[in-house]
Image (tube, rainbow, N blue to C red):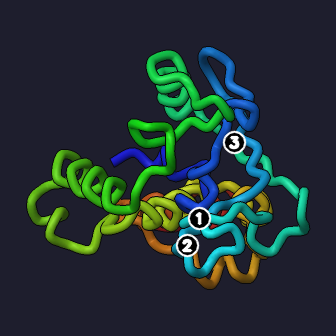
Amino acid sequence: MSTAPSTYARSLEEAAQLTKDSLALPREGWGEITLSDSAPIAGGSWTDTGNRRDRRQLKQRAVGEVRVVPCPPPLTRILNHHLDTLGVTADGRLFRNLTGGDLAESTLSRTWDKARKAALTPDEYTSPLARRPYDLRHACVSFWLAVGVPAAQVAEWAGHSITVLLQIYAKVIAGLENTARKRIEHGLNTMGTSTT
């Protein structure tokens, strides 16, 4: 399963109100997404506006503070295709229901379940693997770390301190343990220390 879609939003809270203006996308290649706020679901009884979602600043950020995250080529293609085929709402939002409103959590859950069923093996599907869309965030951040992106850069993109990043998100990804060992071996060989 690709981690590309997980790279760009802290969670559905940040993706929910994503607008065309927050995207800097070439037709191909790397782009950028500027995250400026989030819209957590709390329910109308618990929000200041009475809506299911209230827009607010990014978690642990000042009002108006933004976070720019990379948009790798696979996601650039996906977002360009989305914009080309579905366009945006009158206020510029990318994601909406059939009437232009917010997507219901039940719709997101059903769609996620269908995607898991299509992408995973039967054993993986019955496991906790990518059980929630938010799990893609963990996988993405762990992947960035595993392929050697410096922790400080990953923390900046993810919107965390390095301490939180390493405590919470630095998970071992299946199959990458051998890659880590090969890097260590390569480093030792480069220093002239035999590994045989």
Residue 157, picture quadrant: bottom right
Local crowd at mark 1 within 10 Å, few (<14), some, or many (≥20)? some
Name the residue carrying label 2: 44
- Mark 3 belongs to which amino acid? Pro
Name the residue carrying label 1: 51
Q: Is residue 191 visible?
A: no
Local crowd at mark 2 within 10 Å, few (<14), some, or many (≥20)? few
- Mark 2 belongs to which amino acid? Gly
Q: Residue at x 65, y 78 (%)?
A: 166
Residue 164, picture quadrant: bottom right
Name the residue carrying label 3: 70
For this view, does 74 lie left or right of residue 122? right
- Nearer the observer: mark 3 or 1; the answer is 1
Give the structural element (helix, strand or loop) at label 3.
strand
Front-lying residue, 186 or 144: 144
Label of residue 84 in the image: none
**99 versus 69 height, above or below:** above
Name, please, the residue furthest toward the left: 122
Local crowd at mark 3 within 10 Å, few (<14), some, or many (≥20)? some
Front-lying residue, 5 or 189: 5
For this view, does 22 lie left or right of residue 103? right
**73 versus 53 height, above or below:** above
Front-lying residue, 76 or 40: 40
**137 versus 34 height, above or below:** below
Name the spot of residue 155 as percent of width and height, x first: 74, 65
Name the spot of residue 9 as percent of width and height, x first: 60, 54
Q: Earlier in the sequence, mark 3 or mark 2?
A: 2
Q: Residue at x 44, y 51 (%)?
A: 103
Q: Earlier in the sequence, mark 3 or mark 1?
A: 1
**24 versus 14 height, above or below:** above
- Residues at marks 1 and 2 touching, judged by CB atoms closer than 8 Å: yes
Q: Is residue 21 visible?
A: yes
